[in-house]
Amino acid sequence: MSETVKYLLEENRLPKDWYNIVADLPRRPDPVLHPGTLRPIGPQDLEPLFPMALIAQEVATERMIEIPEPVREVYRQWRPSPLYRARRLEAALDTPARIYYKYEGVSPAGSHKPNTAVAQAFYNKEAGVRRLTTETGAGQWGSALAFAGAVFGLEVRVYMVRVSFEQKPYRKALMEAWGAECVASPSSETNAGRQILAEHPNSPGSLGIAISEAVEVAAQRADTKYSLGSVLNHVLMHQTVIGQEAMAQLEMAEDYPDIIVGCTGGGSNFAGIAFPFIGAGLRGAPKPRVIACEPSACPSLTRGRYAYDFGDTGHLTPLVKMHTLGSTFVPPGFHAGGLRYHGMAPLVSLLQELGLIESRAYTQLSCFESGIQFARTEGILPAPEANHAVTGAVEEALLCKEDGIARTILLNLCGHGHFDMQAYIDYQAGKLEDRAYDEAELAAAFATLPQVAVA
Ligand SMILES: *Cc1c(COP(=O)(O)O)cnc(C)c1O
């Protein structure tokens, strides 16, 4: 049993450190490149956007990084989050598998996102920042940062992908309740937004576009910084409280996962549940199979190229090496808005290249079907994003049945679907369809990948 697990077991406490998987990888991540020069950047290049404490975490190589006490104090409101055994789902599937789910829907914002929002707001406040800008897809990240901004007394301005802004008015209301401002993206407030609108007046928006808008605004003002809800190393690291807790909770159940599944948009909740286990495996513990579940309409891990690309559509962000569909790729407007991102976290991408994780893509309809089955057995209605992880777990549980093997499956139920009821209304009414992305558009987006000589 590791020191971390022993500590957590003592008093059922929440983790005292975040876990940094970089310390255990056989290879260092590729450098981040400047969008203009395409040369590796230094910490000072990121300073207009992020406080130094977060930049230091972004490039950190030590294994454990202490969680500041004010952050743990906020975490304590809902952490440790519960780990449940899905006995009724197991029975419905008639599987010998043991399925456990870690439930992140108990946070005030209803997802895993506050795990990093609270940390980011704390470090920005410490650095004297007054205002944060950010993007949001389905609205979970925007509402998580709005909550964290309210806790630490920061103004928050959120650019929300237009298709979700229209589908999910309650998320906007929630952000406003916490005191944040929420604008539909592309907006006419920024150069990046105006450029897109000139070409595509009816653009449904995308995370890539919304990031450009939020970065542009943050870069213009000294009292304003930018906050990202996924993809970056420090964001993934903040989420590792999930996996560390799950490890201790499974220890109490005298079990250990054979298989871990999570859904992937930018990769943060997946990293949160999986990285502590993958790291333990790299240090000699059993190695679970780890499966990333993504939407087939935005399949960065299963169909993307592993290449340097911009994080945003307007090419304001640095370049990172990742699985990408191309920064100009705009996925069709399906309901798991939190998964509509063209790229993938560099660390998740690197792990796939190293053969440490697998990935699968699922269609929207099959995911809603699993989500409804989960609700009818376990009672919790998952967020449409989380349905991808449920689908992966169900598939594995049915394989266990075929093989007659009782494997342990750990699934991250990253959020509830209470703000996504329109999606469920549409699904129940038979109005949802599986829209494939446009192959020609994907080819065009691949063609615009920047040509980067090896850094
Ligand atoms: C934001 C979000 C996602 C996608 O982001 P990741 O960084 O891949 O976790 C998935 N599920 C929920 C509930 C979200 O809020």
Image (cartoon, grey):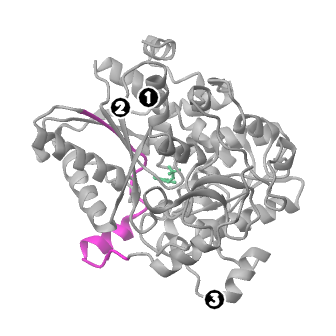
Relative placement, left or right, of 151 versus 43 is left
Place of residue 369 in the rendered image (x, y in percent of width and height, measured from the top left): 24, 62
Depth check: 384 or 442 in front? 442
Relative placement, left or right, of 423 versus 400 is right
Which callout, 2 or 1, points at the residue further toward the start of the chain? 1
Q: For residue 201, which numbered disc appears in the image?
A: 3
Residue 112 visible in the displayed image: no
Depth check: 391 or 80 in front? 391
Q: Amino acid at mark 1?
A: Phe
- The picture quadrant where one finds residue 243 is top left
Q: Amino acid at mark 2?
A: Pro
Query: Number of callouts in the render?
Result: 3
Quadrant where the N terminus is found in the figure = top left
Q: Which residue in the protein does label 1 denote?
A: 277
Mark 3 falls on what kind of element?
Answer: loop
Q: Amino acid at mark 3?
A: Pro
Mark 2 falls on what kind of element?
Answer: loop
Question: Residue at 70% of width from left, 43% of height from top?
Answer: 121
Q: Residues within 10 Å of mark 3 (few under 14, many from 20)?
A: few
Residue 265 visible in the displayed image: yes
User: Cα distance, mark 1 to mark 3?
Assistant: 46 Å
The correct choice, above or below, for 218 with respect to 88 in the image is below
| Contact (Cβ within 8 Å) of mark 2 with mark 1 | yes
User: Cα distance, mark 3 to mark 2?
Assistant: 47 Å
Q: Which residue in the protein does label 2 denote?
A: 288
Depth check: 198 or 305 in front? 305
